[in-house]
Image (cartoon, rainbow, N blue to C red):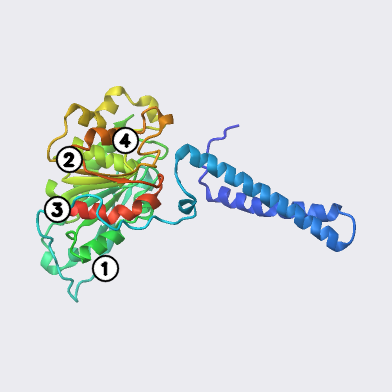
Amino acid sequence: MSIDGSILSPSLADGMVVLAILLPLVIGVICVGRAAGTWWRRALKGAIGCVVVLTCQGIALVAVLLQVNQSYGLYTGWSQLLGQQAPPPRQNLVKIRRHSPVRRIPISKDNPHPEGEWSGIEVEGTDAMYSHLPVWLPPQYFEKSQSHVSFPVLYWVGGLNDTGEHANVTVPITGPAEKLIEDGQVNPFAVVFLPGRIREGQDTECTNIGGMDHQSWILDTVMPKIEKHFRVGHIRAQRFIAGYSTGGYCAANLTSKYPDRFNAGFGLAPYFHPLFDPPQSSQATPLLISENSVVNRVRSGHVPRDVRFLSVISKADRQAWSDPASKGEIDGEEFWKKARSMSQYPFMLLSQGGHTTGTYAPYVPQSLEWLGQYGL
């Protein structure tokens, strides 16, 4: 009998919730039926049976949660686990020096989209669930005075399991973008949301592996189509790329591998060489890994001077900074040691927080503002 199948099925999750609720009730009823004595004694024994089952379920749930968290380092404290997001930083953790003035474009009364507009395109070359790429356009894009102006564009790559639609949910980008544009901290810019993978169950890490040309899809399919349909990009100075986790690695790799395509980028919880899951892990050759390793480029000195990439990493993040159990696979600390003296690679190092969006989302505004000094 095969046990393959998605554990993300809503019906499976709903069924387990129903079972978790009904099981204690059934046991309670059985306890009442088998108990002797007056009705209130039987009811008390039934209630005790329910409480015992619920307590055991709670202990089991916490035990599993702690084991999973121990393995993946998702949360470093109970406050994070309970959904409390880290407060926004009170000061800049990285130097920001603007090289050119921001374009302040007033919003007129006849602007059809004074709050900006969500658009999108369908792009071939992926499974159906990854083919739609949402595009957010700032209100200035719709000003009549700007009808022939090309705007900067940020390509945002989601985490491994993100579709384009979900990428802005996992790490909110457009909210901070609107605020920074309104405050004149960055130029009006568009955002294109890319998925973390292009085939279901295939971890291609924005590389070309096993006949799935994820990297070429971004560079040769997505970008030309975006620039054909929208007044964005077209030249290196107007293109930026960033992402979270797997998307952070993608951004780190593409900015240094194709410096003629991207002006600058940043990564939240990035890593710096491809970390393939099966089946790609068995298909990855040493040459493929080396050609897509930012660590190797830094180690060999093959990083062009005009590369600009900001890394935002928590030292408590065992999936991005370091983990002794990974035997060197988690390479954030190693990369920091080798790249921290290079002007191409500034860092924002956080003292606490695991590999969750709650750790990193508060640093989106400052990261976008950092890109602003290069034209975003």
Query: Which residue matches tag 3?
Result: 97
Residue furthest to the bottom: 109
Kindly report the distance in space between the C-alpha atoms of the residues bearing marks 2 and 3: 14 Å
Q: Which mark is residue 39?
A: none
In the rendered structure, which amino acid carries the disc numbered 2? Gln
CA neighbours of label 2 inside 10 A, class few (<14), some (14 to 19), many (20+): some
Kindly report the distance in space between the C-alpha atoms of the residues bearing marks 1 and 2: 35 Å
Left/right placement of residue 189 relative to residue 73 reads left
Which residue is at the front of the view, 336 or 184? 336
Can you give x and y, in whole percent of width and height, for residue 258 in the image? 18, 37
Q: Secondary structure at mark 4?
A: helix
Query: Which residue matches tag 4?
Result: 333
User: Which residue does the image show at 84% across and 55% down from the upper left?
Assistant: 33
User: Which residue does the image show at 30% across and 61% down from the upper left?
Assistant: 175
Which residue is at the front of the view, 116 or 54? 54
CA neighbours of label 1 inside 10 A, class few (<14), some (14 to 19), many (20+): few
Q: Secondary structure at mark 1?
A: loop
Query: Which residue matches tag 1?
Result: 115
Which mark is first along the chain, 2 or 4?
4
Q: Name above or below for residue 300 compared with residue 340.
A: above
Which mark is first along the chain, 2 or 1?
1
Evaluate if marks 4 and 2 touch, with contact meaning CB atoms under 8 Å apart. Answer: no
Q: Secondary structure at mark 3?
A: loop
Query: Which residue matches tag 2?
Result: 344
Foreground mark, 4 or 1, reads 4
Q: Secondary structure at mark 2?
A: loop
